[in-house]
């Protein structure tokens, strides 16, 4: 075992340890957050596959390495779909059939198997005792079928890169806006988090692709492969650090977002006395008696129902419970209570959480957060601080210390 192989093994070991740390970290966000975090787990397992491949390159015979390409090459196509599905989940816009994003693994695996078969039966010697010495630029005509297959796979990788990165950025931009509107998140910090995460993903994908190309086209590339994998491990480490220090904020889907935003604009156009500042009058969706009825019904739901603690509660669902249309409820919330739907929900949930934090001091913050409808501890912390000005842990400790002063 030469020096480059020892270094490669160390890099692989560190990378696997980082992946294990990330997977353990994701489990602490709560059961409801697992629906999104499962895609980061898939992403981590894909990174693990890269490090396992490095280990196999050192310990396995060339023939087994060739056969394992049928597994490791298709795995490359898992990186971007898993991150795309993750962002769709934290933005509360889950894909109905997520498995469809991984269908491409089947044709890639078939093409790789065909290439491996051709290499084993037509190109490589019958008894492989040493290193496989195969270059695409040597006697290219005899290797044309394999070269065509490998080139097709590489092109597919880059088509996937550009296609998914556009979709990921679109979802990320919408997610940034939702997190700012619903939770009052610091847009600068949140934007940096998203940018670092997506930049890291892009670098990992490009490094992974570069490693594949190096292995295919360059002979005796052990040190170059080691350097590339070292860069891969560093980028992956940075991504783990970003996720550990800034967990994702889970937002709620905007079932009637356009209508609610329109209502917000209408509300801003009124003065304190209710007079319109523009030359147009708002559409009168509900009369005074109906407004009073809706407000009373909201108070009853707030005090005597657990509907608002349902993590899947939506504007249409609440409107149905109130006995009004979504537009009417949004109108009353915005113009008569001065709140958006999300502000109203978070205020009720935070009020109940405040009570539980003090009355049940032995109960964990994560357990309380999920019991009142929040999808993750990080989302709960931000919403709680936006409304109370304190984090849940600080609120609990200060309130309990006032109740039980030290004599």
Image (tube, rainbow, N blue to C red):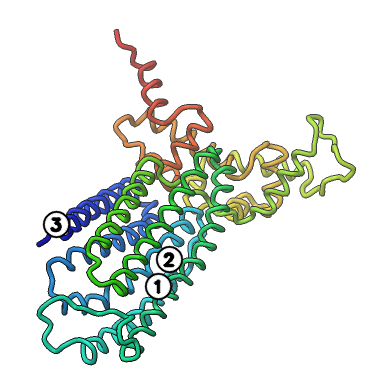
Establish if 158 lies above or below 299: below
**Would you say residue 125 is visible in this rendering?**
yes
Alpha carbons under labels 1 and 2: distance apart? 7 Å
Describe the element under mark 2 as helix, strand or loop. helix
Distance between the Cα atoms at labels 2 and 3?
A: 36 Å
- Mark 2 against mark 3, which lies toward the viewer? 3
Q: Are marks 1 and 2 in contact (CB under 8 Å)?
A: yes
Is residue 303 visible in the rendered image? The answer is no
Measured as percent of width and height from the top left, residue 65 is found at 19, 75
Q: Which residue is mark 2?
A: 81
Question: How many C-alpha atoms fall within 10 Å of the one at disc 3: few (<14), some, or many (≥20)?
Answer: few
Q: In what element is the residue under mark 3?
A: helix
Residue at image position (67%, 37%) is 337
Dot 1 or dot 2, earlier in sequence: 2
| Residue tagged 3 | 3
Q: Are marks 2 and 3 in contact (CB under 8 Å)?
A: no
What is the distance, in whole Å, between disc 3 and disc 1 at their CAs? 38 Å
> Pointer 2: residues within 10 angstroms few (<14), some, or many (20+)?
many
Asked if labels 1 and 3 touch by Cβ distance under 8 angstroms, the answer is no
Q: Name the residue at 25% across, 80% down.
A: 134
């Amino acid at each position: 075992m030469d020096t480059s192989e020892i270094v490669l093994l160390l890099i692989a070991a560190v990378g696997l340890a980082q992946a294990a740390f990330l997977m353990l970290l994701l489990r602490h966000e709560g059961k409801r957050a697992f629906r999104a975090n499962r895609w980061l787990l898939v992403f981590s397992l894909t990174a693990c596959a890269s490090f396992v491949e490095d280990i196999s390159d050192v310990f396995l015979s060339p023939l087994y390495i060739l056969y394992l390409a049928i597994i490791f090459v298709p795995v490359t196509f898992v990186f971007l779909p898993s991150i795309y599905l993750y962002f769709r989940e934290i933005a509360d816009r889950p894909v109905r059939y997520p498995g469809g994003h991984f269908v491409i693994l089947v044709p890639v695996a078939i093409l790789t198997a065909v290439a491996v078969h051709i290499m084993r039966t037509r190109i490589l010697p019958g008894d492989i005792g040493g290193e496989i010495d195969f270059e695409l630029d040597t006697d290219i005509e005899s290797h044309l079928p394999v070269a065509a297959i490998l080139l097709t796979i590489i092109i597919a990788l880059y088509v996937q890169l550009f296609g998914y990165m556009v979709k990921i950025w679109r979802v990320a931009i919408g997610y940034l806006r939702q997190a700012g509107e619903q939770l009052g998140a610091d847009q600068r910090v949140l934007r940096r988090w998203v940018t670092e995460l997506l930049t890291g993903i892009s670098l990992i994908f490009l490094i992974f692709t570069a490693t594949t190309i190096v292995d295919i086209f360059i002979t005796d590339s052990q040190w170059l492969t080691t350097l590339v994998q070292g860069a891969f491990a560093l980028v992956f480490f940075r991504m783990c650090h970003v996720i550990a220090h800034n967990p994702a904020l889970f937002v709620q889907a905007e079932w009637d977002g356009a209508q609610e935003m329109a209502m917000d604009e209408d509300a801003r156009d009124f003065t304190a006395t209710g007079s319109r500042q523009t030359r147009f009058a708002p559409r009168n969706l509900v009369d005074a008696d109906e407004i009073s009825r809706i407000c009373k019904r909201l108070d009853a739901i707030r005090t005597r129902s657990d509907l608002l603690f349902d993590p899947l509660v939506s504007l249409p669902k609440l409107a149905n419970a109130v006995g009004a249309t979504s537009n009417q409820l949004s109108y009353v919330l915005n113009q008569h209570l001065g709140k958006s739907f999300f502000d109203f929900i978070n205020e009720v949930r935070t009020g109940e959480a405040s009570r539980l934090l003090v009355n049940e001091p032995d109960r964990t913050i994560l357990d309380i957060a999920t019991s009142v409808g929040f999808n993750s501890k990080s989302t709960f912390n931000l919403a709680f601080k936006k409304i109370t000005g304190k984090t849940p842990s600080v609120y609990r400790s200060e309130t309990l210390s006032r109740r039980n002063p030290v004599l």
